[in-house]
């Protein structure tokens, strides 16, 4: 029997489970270098000039937008992020970078509900996030991303890692020294009907390797096939260009028509 033990948070009056509550404090330590490098590589591979704006769905702690912002002109950025934990890290990043703060608008909502200006962006990204979108909402989400883009705008999103729910044996995500302590992240997963259940565990070790603290966070994702995702994007009015292959990751390039 699986139980959600994550913190409850309230976004614009709606109560939602913050599946990233425990992860947020360690997220940048374990992932930001990789996610920023990937964002830079993607931008280079996609080519084209960014002249209007950037939309990031599931912006997390903002490592992707910060990396993109450093490479493009002073265009506005909209970061959609429902987790109060992740937004805490995102706002801290903006507080430390007045230039990024001045051009970034944070939308504290899920992709299922976000609203942004039409045609404000020429680049939309959704990285490591789309399997979190419940299937019935996905077609509408893709349409709203398309509407947010100018004609010829590009939507970059990674191909789902799982096409069906499968047992994921526990594996370490990384370990990082912080002073005399070490933060260790690990993950495991199990099928849960049509969904995939994930548990991320964060352990802090002291200098002797003794466990000082241990926290878990749990959430579900919806596996889907690449074919289904491509079909949904085409249905929403996108044209699929050549995929971008990055260190074993396939990233879809969905382009809006004229
Ligand atoms: C694995 S993190 C990736 C963050 C960022 N895109 C990156 O690459 O570093 C997934 C993010 O998606 C967010 N998320 C989860 N469900 C979401 C939803 N329904 N709509 C928008 N974002 C969601 C989480 O709060 C989390 O910040």
Image (cartoon, helix red, strand yellow):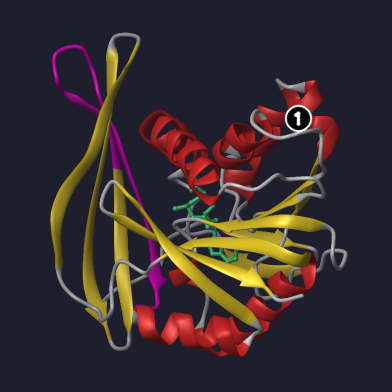
Q: Position of residue 243 (x, y in %)?
A: 41, 63
Does any portion of residue 224 appear in the rendered image?
no
Q: Position of residue 233 (x, y in %)?
A: 56, 81
Determine the residue positioned at 80% across, 22% down.
98
- Of 20 and 252, the residue lying toward us: 252
Q: Position of residue 121 (x, y in %)?
A: 78, 56
Q: Position of residue 67 (x, y in %)?
A: 58, 33
Determine the residue positioned at 52% across, 41% down.
44
- Of 191 and 72, the residue lying toward us: 72
Determine the residue positioned at 63% across, 33% down.
66
Residue at numbered disc 1:
100
22 displayed left or right of 49: left
Is residue 208 found inside the magenta-colored segment of the image? yes
Task: Please identify the quadrant where the N terminus is shown.
Answer: bottom left
Does any portion of residue 187 appear in the rendered image?
yes
Is residue 47 found inside the magenta-colored segment of the image? no
Q: In which quadrant of the rendered view does residue 221 lie? A: bottom left
In the displayed structure, would residue 13 be above or below residue 124?
A: below
């Amino acid at each position: 029997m699986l139980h959600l033990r994550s913190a409850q948070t309230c976004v614009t009056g709606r109560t939602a489970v913050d599946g990233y509550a425990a992860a947020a404090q360690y997220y940048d330590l374990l992932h930001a270098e990789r996610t920023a490098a990937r964002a830079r590589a993607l931008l280079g591979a996609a080519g084209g000039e960014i002249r209007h704006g950037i939309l990031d769905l599931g912006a997390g702690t903002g490592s992707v937008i910060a990396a993109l912002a450093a490479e493009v002109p002073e265009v506005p950025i909209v970061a959609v992020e429902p987790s109060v934990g992740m937004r805490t890290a995102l706002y801290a990043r903006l507080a430390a970078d007045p230039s990024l703060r001045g051009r970034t608008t944070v939308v504290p909502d899920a992709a299922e509900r976000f609203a942004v200006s039409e045609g404000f962006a020429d680049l939309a990204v959704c990285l490591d996030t789309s399997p979190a979108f419940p299937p019935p909402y996905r077609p509408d989400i893709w349409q709203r991303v398309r509407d947010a883009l100018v004609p010829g705008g590009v939507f970059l999103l990674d191909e789902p890692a799982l096409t069906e729910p499968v047992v994921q044996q526990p594996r370490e995500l990384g370990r990082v020294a912080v002073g005399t302590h070490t933060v260790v992240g690990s993950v495991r997963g199990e099928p849960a009907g049509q969904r995939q259940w994930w548990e991320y565990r964060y352990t802090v070790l002291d200098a002797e390797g003794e466990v000082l603290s241990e926290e878990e966070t749990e959430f579900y994702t919806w596996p889907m096939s690449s074919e289904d995702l491509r079909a949904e994007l085409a249905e929403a009015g996108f044209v699929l260009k050549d995929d971008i292959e990055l260190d074993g990751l396939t990233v879809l390039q969905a382009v809006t028509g004229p």
